[in-house]
Image (cartoon, rainbow, N blue to C red):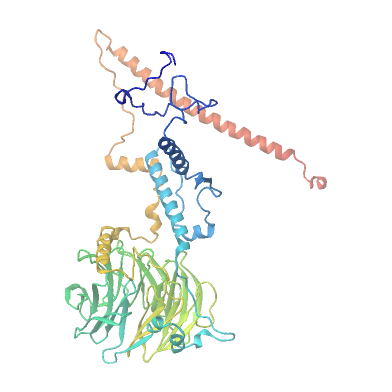
Amino acid sequence: MAATSEAVVNPAHVEKTKKAPARYWDEPQEGKDENKVGKDGEQTEETLPQKHVEKAKKRKNDEDRGDAKKFISGKPDPFPGPAHISKDRMQKFKRRDKTKKIPRQHYKLKDMMARSDEVSEMAQKQAARIDLLLPEDAGFLEGDEDEDTCTISQEDISDAVDITSASKYFDLKLSQFGPYRLDYSRTGRHLLLGGRRGHIACIDWQTKQLMCEINVMESINDVKWLHSEAMYAVAQKKWLYIYDSNGIELHCIRKFNDVLRMQFLPYHFLLATVSATSFLQYLDVSVGKEVAAINTKTGRLDVMCQNPQNAIVHLGHSNGTVTLWSPNQKEALVKMLCHQGAVRSVAVDKTGTYMVTSGMDKKLKVYDIRAFKPLKSYFLPAGASCLSLSQRGLLSAATGDIVQVYRDVWSTPVTKPYMAHRVQRTVWGMQFCPFEDVLGVGHGEGFTSMLIPGAGEPNFDGLDSNPYRSVKQRQEWEVKALLEKIHPELITLDPTELGQVDQATFQQKHQDRVQALGFDPLAKEKFIPRYKKKGRSSAGSIERRKRQVANEDLRETVQQSSEDKMKIEKERKEREKKEVLLSSKKSALDRFKK
């Protein structure tokens, strides 16, 4: 029988106490056996319930997985850090150069410019990474051996491609009200046709669905879509009219009379028009007000295009010059003598780098707008009456009833066209469709849609121009575009100037401030001694205090001048040392000296 002292008494259930919760500082000591009972009678892993042991192991595994930088599925990452991006791909999406370092005292501006550079670099890297995910590639028409692609007809192309692409080649016979001007919407989905004799038609050309068709009973000079396919502008015989997609007249703007050509600036919501009275006018379609009216004093204006990069308007004149205009100035920004005869057509590529012009001298010229210098010059036997550039850099030129498409006109000399097609009557209007390999041609017998492989951009930006957007998406995009509208005051020849820091010197700024205020705010105030009592403000003591302050100012000036003299003297001595070293060196030609 066991002794009374050795008897084990099982305590009652009510006497059991809960174990204190574990704390992060209660870690087991290393080097000791954790499977034995401690001195204070604490429970070990053997005595712990199985549930607690499993929870501890699970927590440890979760901590190991949580360190994603070092571990993947419990193992070290063999390729740590972000994936490498090639320099060529980064250069493709480069937005701007890094800003120059600014003086140290402008710490707030320096911090802001550093954050701007970081955001720009991050956007550049993201665009370069997403470039791998773009699904479509641009292709071109390739012929067999010893076969020119310009000899391939549109019928042969439509027979060789799929049904959807073949349906994009069609003719609209509208001989009664021609010739026709045309305009594609920014999404490339809708087509606007305007006949010389008053016929207007809006078409969803991919589904061949007619949106509206009216006759204004007046001659039409030009038609242009506005910010969306819900409204368009028509330059009629007298005034400028605005219609909606149902053909209902919304506005008649009598300030814009005798309009011949129009261009719409989508990011500024500006409709630029030129007239037979030599006026260039800008209309803000978001508020319906005239922004600027400029008298160019160059006669009748019927040649016009815009630079998509900086929203500068290019005008061609009868004296062979091309002028560049902004709504902020009454004079032309640039005047270029391009042809010996009148300018017939002007086109600018989407990057804003190259400009193509054609004139009455039967020449086709390519200019670099950055340097305003000619790059290439081609001679066309009959000249080009209408020019158009695609998103991928193809150039279409209309000569009478023949449409010719050229490839790489500014990089390599072109000897023959890429494609050619003959329409029924003289071409009056021509434009490439955005995001499609299609060229629309308006002529005297109606409209022709041509297939031009490699003309359109295969990948579109869904936040900017989405061809498949719904009505709700179009409404949301319109609201965002209005909120992000760029003011016309920001239209400049070089848009990168808006992001540069003004490097004017402090002296120039200080002089401007002095002229504006009428006094120098940084000038040292004249010392006036403070009045003291008990006879300490006598005339002698006041003069003595004034002299003491003047001596201190003079001491600072003398010290500064002496430091400058010492610096100049030190530079002079170093220069003399260098000259002595150079003169002491012997030359191989010294042996010829007498």
Measuring from the top left, give residue 122's x and y in whole percent: 43, 52
Measuring from the top left, give residue 87's x and y in whole percent: 53, 57
Measuring from the top left, give residue 9's x and y in whole percent: 37, 20
For residue 244, side relative to residue 29 (left or right) = left
| Quadrant in the picture for residue 282 | bottom left
Task: State whether residue 501 is above or below residue 369.
Answer: above
Depth check: give the residue in front, 94 or 569.
94
Task: State whether residue 290 is above or below residue 223.
Answer: above
Depth check: give the residue in front, 549 or 39.
39
Residue found at the far front of this picture = 1
Depth check: give the residue in front, 471 or 550.
471
Depth check: give the residue in front, 452 or 371.
452
Measuring from the top left, give residue 384's x and y in whole percent: 42, 83
Q: Is residue 275 visible?
A: no
Tell me what residue is drawn at x 48 percent, y 41 percent: 64
* Number of on-image labels: 0
Q: Is residue 128 visible?
A: yes
| Quadrant in the picture for residue 586 | top right
| Quadrant in the picture for residue 390 | bottom left
Task: State whether residue 347 is above or below residue 2.
Answer: below
Tell me the quarter of the image containing the N terminus.
Answer: top left
For residue 237, side relative to residue 509 (left or right) = left
Tell me the quarter of the image containing the C terminus.
Answer: top right
